[in-house]
Structures are given as structure tokens and as C-alpha cells.
Amino acid sequence: MTPCPRPCLCRSFTLVEMLAVVALLAAGAGLAVNALAAPGVDARIRAAMASTLDLDRLARLSARNGRVTVLQATPERDRLVLVAGPERERLAEEPLPDGVRVYLSDVITGDPIDQVRVGTDGRSRDYTVVFMINDATKAWSVSGLTGWSRPIGDPR
């Protein structure tokens, strides 16, 4: 074995090897950021759904006391409001977590609706609640008879 005439060149990495390592580290960091960001988005959407179901329950209880109650999203889609009676008294208002937008739609037709009206018997139409944050979208179907809900796409 002959000694290398230039020892400093024999022990160094090539530019291609270094670029390959940097590219692999960047790809791994990108995957890690996406994996860590997803639970935060899911948690915010679940918190928004919990607030929505709380307002739905409150609407049904209030309506059974003899006042028609309405659940509606604000025009900015960043909060839900519960109003009651012909004077439209504001019973409750729930801001949604940062970045979450809410849309209500009819379960059967899929048409957007402005509000969900709960009659004095505590019933409403079946409706869908759609939450959007960045590129993530989650939807729940809510029964107008009982207020029971389930995620759309859930086989249960």
C-alpha cells in the first residue's frame, strides 16, 4: 500500500456526500415538523367540537323552557353564538380556538345553513358541523332529535 501523496485530500468528504447528508437531515426535519404540528391541529378542532356540542346541549335545554333557540356561526366564522326568543337574547357565545373556522350545513343536501333552530320540543334539523384549520378539515354529523354526534367517516 502506497501512502497518499496529499493526506488532507484522502480523509475529507466530497461535496456530494455533504450535500446528501444535508438533504437527508432537511427531509427528516420536515417530517418531524409535520408530525408534531398535526396533534396541535387535531386538538384545536376537538376543542372547537366540544364547544359546539356544549352550545347544542344548552340550546336544547333552553328551548325546552319554552323559547325557540338558535345556534349560529358569526359571519367571520370564528365563534358560535346562541340566541333565544323573538328578542334574540344572546345566551352564550363561544370563541373557537385560533385559526379554526366553522361552517354549518344540512346533512341531507349538504347545503350551507346560517343557523340551527331548536324548537320548544328540544329538536332541530340534522346538521353537519365542519371545522377548517389551514389545510385540515374535520366534519361531525349532529342528530337533530337527540344532539348525538359522530365524526363523518366514522363507521360507528
Image (cartoon, rainbow, N blue to C red):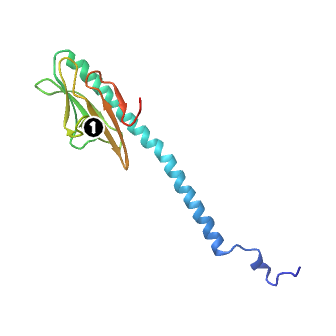
Report the residue that reaches farthest toward the bottom. 5
Mark 1, secondary structure of its residue: strand
User: Left of 6 or right of it: where is 69?
Assistant: left
| Quadrant showing the N terminus | bottom right
Residue 133 on image: x %, y %: 36, 46
Look at mark 1 in the image and give the residue it sits on. 79
Name the residue located 63 percent from the left edge and 73 percent from the top edge.
Answer: 16
Name the residue located 24 percent from the left edge and 35 percent from the top edge.
Answer: 108
Would residue 13 be visible to someone looking at this image? yes
Q: Identify residue type, mark 1.
A: Arg
Q: In terms of image quadrants, where is residue 101? A: top left
Report the residue that reaches farthest toward the left. 86
Name the residue located 61 percent from the left edge and 67 percent from the top edge.
Answer: 20
Report the residue that reaches farthest toward the right. 1
User: Left of 145 or right of it: where is 150?
Assistant: right
Q: Is residue 99 above or below residue 30?
A: above
User: Left of 89 or right of it: where is 154?
Assistant: right
Would residue 99 be visible to someone looking at this image? no
Residue 5 on image: x %, y %: 82, 84
Is residue 100 or residue 94 the one in the foreground? Answer: 100
Name the residue located 64 percent from the left edge and 70 percent from the top edge.
Answer: 18
Is residue 81 or residue 42 the one in the foreground? Answer: 42
Q: Is residue 135 above or below residue 71?
A: below
Q: In terms of image quadrants, where is residue 147? A: top left
